[in-house]
Amino acid sequence: MHVMVIGAAGMVGRKLLDKLAAEAGILGGDIEKLTLVDVIEPLAPAGFAGNCISKAADLADPGVAEQLITARPDVIFHLAAIVSGEAEADFEKGYRVNLDGTRAIFEAIRLESRKAPYRPRVIFASSIAVFGTPFPDKIGDEFFTTPLTSYGTQKAICELLLSDYSRRGFFDGIGIRLPTICIRPGKPNKAASGFFSNILREPLSGQEAVLPVDESVRHWFASPRAAVGFFIHAATLDLEKVGPRRNLSMPGLSALVGEEIEALKRVAGEKAVRLIRREPDPTIQKIVAGWATDFDATRAAKLGFKAETAFDEIIRAHIEDELGGKIPA
Amino acid sequence: MHVMVIGAAGMVGRKLLDKLAAEAGILGGDIEKLTLVDVIEPLAPAGFAGNCISKAADLADPGVAEQLITARPDVIFHLAAIVSGEAEADFEKGYRVNLDGTRAIFEAIRLESRKAPYRPRVIFASSIAVFGTPFPDKIGDEFFTTPLTSYGTQKAICELLLSDYSRRGFFDGIGIRLPTICIRPGKPNKAASGFFSNILREPLSGQEAVLPVDESVRHWFASPRAAVGFFIHAATLDLEKVGPRRNLSMPGLSALVGEEIEALKRVAGEKAVRLIRREPDPTIQKIVAGWATDFDATRAAKLGFKAETAFDEIIRAHIEDELGGKIPA
């Protein structure tokens, strides 16, 4: 089996690759070849016994997607995108990377399938940014996509393309709308959503973190481990069960910031909680107020997608996956 | 005021132009210039006193949209598309015309607006084909778009682009999802939906018509006159009232084929009804079974869009607009 990961240098991409390398049979057949693609040359995962090829490539450049697809990967994880803030700041770049780059892959597969039968599984990383306010407290599986960012627009368009290309039989596609990933490993970044992770990750390592919003803010979460699980499940799921509606809001955990903090206290004690510094930031508060807070992800749950059901689990997954199983003293 | 109609050679385009020519103040300012665009050179409407320019152009050809938009029309009606059947039969042509052609116009406006302030009103003809089965008996204003044709996919994508370009301030866009237009003037055609019009139009002219489905089939209708009204209203409506959700399912009339026939009887008598020949066609029955039958178009109705509320009105509009006000003896 030949697996291609596009966006292989990103956080979720790397974790997915680690999983594929560690459990080469996880997709139901032995993975003999891994092709990693990103705008910077991605690192090969440790411990992969098969053939691993890393490529630095810009999918929106003419001919790049065609060239990649001539190798006829059986499974393609497409996680590459520029993020919401950048797509909003640079309109042309956002459409070029997030829409034209994705369409180039889809087209390359279609054209390849016309040369000789070819129908790979395509797993596309979408986003809950396809939804825009006002929405119900719980966004259901049949709610319309009215994004309020260019990023969300690009994702919603790619979802439509994915469904149509799948319906026409060019590939077997499935779109995965990820919740906010928490706890993101690494350093605090400038993303408006960063604090959801910062207030847990930093105190778990004995560092201070800033909380710019009220504890009553509700949001929608899944761990990096759950995200990898979504992609693996999407790659192996019987798509007959999914039918023509190929884009799914993933299950997640709807929780208050206050519940994050209570879980931190249970897992790491009062000392960790004292490292959270409250610095209200009206700009961040306003951005966050426009975000979805809860989903009714019944369809995905019925199809076997699983996420955490309590913040304690999310924190423990972080401690196991990032901190070697224990909280630094 | 300079008004551009793209898709000006089509049935709705021509009726819209007749209205604009007859009532040059209808958009709230005098129309001094009309630019008509289509793949074949459109005919100028009779009786227009201003400057009228007709152009044969393919919008998806490089540079064509930019060239058109340098004239900076104040109002742009974009009605050009290849129809559902053709977009399904020719995948590449469908995406080229219905998606790339529309995106080329939107991009041309954006680039023109960067040269000097420019923000036209753009009225886009969308379709209820953005919806795919299964759907509720009445499709509401917040139901998701999961098209089951490439045509519907292309329309849904253009709706998303229209909203994003409007949100970014490049133009003031509004998308109009038309019901099935009935009674279509002209000759019977091969569209699967043709019979809805044929069984009224042909008997009204003393000709036989074929009914391939059962009288219990329900569908969603508006007259050509109502369609023109939607476009005119969309061109003049205060878009502040519409907000960021720029694509609207238009009001219409949900009616049974049997109700069409009853109305024909009331308006034109039993003699007309006897000209309908029942020839069940399983292929057409199957296609029609996948179509939407009713909408809850509350939003559009609140915004002042109006359609017929009884089939007698639809038939009378046809008699007035196409038959000189009376049924041929």
Image (cartoon, coloured by chain):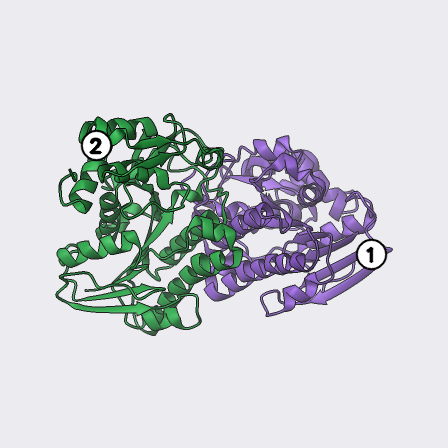
Chain colours: A green, B purple
Residue that carries the numbered disc 2 in the rendered image: A312
Secondary element at tag 2: helix
User: Considering depth in this image, is B123 or B90 the residue closer to the camera?
Assistant: B123
Q: From the viewer's perspective, is residue A315 above or below residue A47?
A: above
Q: Are marks 1 and 2 in contact (CB under 8 Å)?
A: no
Q: Residue placed at 71% from the left, 63% from the top?
A: B70
- Residue B222 visible here: yes
- Residue B195 visible here: no
Q: Quadrant of residue B51?
A: bottom right
Q: From the viewer's perspective, is residue B231 above or below residue A217?
A: below
- Quadrant where the C terminus of chain B sits is top right
Residue that carries the numbered disc 1 in the rendered image: B46
* Residue B105 located left or right of residue A305: right
Q: Amino acid at mark 2?
A: Asp
Q: Position of residue A319 (x, y in %)?
A: 18, 41
User: Considering depth in this image, is B318 or A54 the residue closer to the camera?
Assistant: A54
